Image: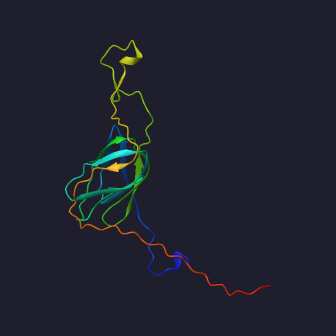
Amino acid sequence: MKIAKLKNYKKPIRHNYKIHISADNGECYLESGVDVAGIQIKFNGPAEITPQLPEGWILQGNSNMILIFSLEGKIIKNQLLFTYEGVVKIKDVVACNKRGERFRETFNKRPLTWGTSNWDMSIEADKWENFKDKRKKGVVNKTSYNLPDYGLPKVEKTKIKKQKIRRRSTGGGY
């Protein structure tokens, strides 16, 4: 059965409001004129990530995706989301309001530039060695998170035992 034929199916709403996520110089920002209730960021690059969220907000992630949300129904607008050491190259962003309605998302894919924010030009520029890169750096081999204690119930990890599937043979021949 096709989804369009289901009785109570409502096509997802996508608002024309735009939000923008930028990750540069070791900081990831949300720029928005509307209330944002949840964000998903897919990224490449190993980084050590530290949340910078307001009270009541939670950041969780793995090696290539970050979820940012509030269990208390709180909203954010213009906000520093997290700081990082290493590399965060954003691949995709999804953001929504309290009703789960998605916004139009934009994000930066910034190449290395020779802007004044990244380079210290206050010294004599007659030698290549005198250029100092001010971007935050760090050798990070694996993505990790410096998360606070959110006070959530702890869940014990258990291994799921794989069961062998026995196949019965009827035997027989040709």
Residue 112: tell me if it is visible: yes
- The image position of residue 135, as x and y in percent, is 34, 32
- The image position of residue 10, as x and y in percent, is 44, 73
Tag count in the figure?
A: 0
* Front-most of residues 86 and 106: 86
Q: Quadrant of the C terminus?
A: bottom right
- The image position of residue 165, as x and y in percent, is 55, 78
Q: Residue furthest right?
A: 174
* Front-most of residues 91 and 21: 91
The residue drawn where x is 38% and y is 41% is 140
Decide if residue 58 is on the left or right side of residue 166: left
Residue 35: tell me if it is visible: no
Decide if residue 112 is on the left or right side of residue 135: right
Q: Quadrant of residue 121?
A: top left
* Rendering colour mode: rainbow
The residue drawn where x is 55% and y is 76% is 2
Decide if residue 112 is on the left or right side of residue 32: right
Q: Is residue 133 above or below residue 81?
A: above
Q: Quadrant of the N terminus?
A: bottom right
Q: Is residue 84 above or below residue 158?
A: above
The residue drawn where x is 40% and y is 14% is 127
Q: Quadrant of residue 25?
A: top left
Q: Is residue 111 above or below residue 12?
A: above
Q: Is residue 142 above or below residue 131?
A: below
- The image position of residue 124, as x and y in percent, is 33, 13
* Front-most of residues 36 and 58: 58
